[in-house]
Amino acid sequence: MRTRKSTSLLIIILLIAAATFVSGLNVIAQETQETAEENNDQEKISDLQEEIDKYVDKLKNLQSREESLSKEIETADGQIYLTQLRIQNSIATLRAKENEIQKLSGDIEELGVRINKLEKSIDYQEMLLGQRMRSRYKNYETSPVMVIFGSSTFNTLVQKTEYLKVLGIQDRRLMDQMSKTKTAYGQQKNLFEDKKEKEESLKRQVEVEKANLEGYRGQLEDQKFEKEKLLELTQNDETKYKKLLEEAQRELNQILGAATFLKGQKSKEVDKGEVIGIQGNTGFSSGEHLHFGVYKYSSFDDIDGWNWYYSNYINPKDKLKSKNVYWNTGCEAPGYKSVGNGDWSWPLSAPTISQGFGTTCWSSRLYGGKPHPAYDMYGPYSSPVFAVEKGDAYFCRNCLGDGGNGVFIFHPGGYMTLYWHLK
């Protein structure tokens, strides 16, 4: 009876091992195919990244060339193509990560089945071993020989018999197999947890990559729109582009010259919201608008020669109160934005922003790569311009004799605001 039970157990263990081996062969074949697919994905991603790096270098080299419309168009085309490459790379990366997640999901499911089988195998082995131990103990205690001769005599009679040798060997084999099964169970559990952790990490990476992809798609639309506006503004004419460059430089020189002229002049105290001029196109303006800048200066004495314009400037949104304004800068698709974190009034009651603050698509083309330290904005024709906060105002009414009009106002707290292109 015991021999048949032991033989049955060994057969079961061998069947489990055989099934595991066959399953392992199938897994190896599947993993070989999946590895080939992963390699193809990685090669495509690597090729795209190589092309991206190539165009990044190409755009850097373009910056060293002399300013021209052809350079700007070539740069715009390069940026559009670079963004398209990044979109392709992002899509390929997403596909690779999603495939990896799918593979991990299958591995995790299969590991779950294996772990369940191992748990059942351990339970069965422990149950069978317990039964064998209890049966041997019972037979040992109730044996007639044991009752007649006592335990000492019984042990002397049977300890060297083949029967007990066989049972001992089989029990040791069973315990050894149980130990191996438990070891395999622990390894599979650890592998299961590792794969689950990797799966969660990949899912987070996928969400980040999806956000990047949406960003690239929006950027591509903005770049195409920006190129269209450039061609519209210049009419694809090199001469007109050169004229825009010259006008931008003359505008800067005019503002700097006005600040120098007004340094010794008298100021006028103005209140918040007071009309200080009318929106115009004086001073080399390409169209009627207001150039509005904010600086950290207490008086003209703080302004250092010709360098102040690109020093101590502040993003106007940090001082202006929150307002929903329309953006139509030519650097991105037009639309409304909520702008403003401060408590100052806006200089125009219903402004459209035509150029933002800082690095813009126009600052790299018209200002030698320097930032635009202001907002350009316009309202309805001949809109009144208001003081954003009370302060001491200095008015330039064609003060340099070149038709430029503007106002500098010094406010409490050490701030200065600049209003230019007024009528």
Image (tube, rainbow, N blue to C red):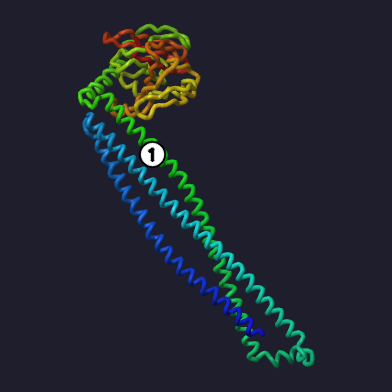
Q: Position of residue 302 (x, y in %)?
A: 38, 18
Relative to 10, 64 lies left or right: left
The reply to whether residue 377 is in sight is yes
Q: Hey, which quadrant is residue 119 in on the image? A: bottom right
Q: Hey, which quadrant is residue 114 in on the image? A: bottom right
The reply to whether residue 263 is in sight is no
Q: Position of residue 25 (x, y in %)?
A: 45, 69
Relative to 411, 1 lies left or right: right
Q: Tell me which residue sits at (60%, 78%) in the image.
A: 174
Is residue 322 depicted above or below 64 in this figure? above
Q: Which residue is mark 1?
A: 216
Q: Tell me which residue sits at (29%, 46%) in the image.
A: 51
Q: Tell me which residue sits at (59%, 65%) in the image.
A: 116
> Of the residues shown, which amino acid type is indicated by label 1?
Tyr
Relative to 105, 95 lies left or right: left
* Quarter the N terminus occupies: bottom right
Q: Hey, which quadrant is residue 311 in on the image? A: top left
Q: Tell me which residue sits at (49%, 69%) in the image.
A: 23
Front-most of residues 336 and 243: 336
Is residue 346 depicted above or below 265 in this figure? below
* Quarter the C terminus occupies: top left
Residue lying at the far right in this picture: please name it. 148
Disc 1 packing (10 Å; few <14; some 14–19; many ≥20): many
Q: Position of residue 47 (x, y in %)?
A: 31, 50
Q: Secondary structure at mark 1?
A: helix
Figure label count? 1
Q: Position of residue 373 (x, y in %)?
A: 36, 23
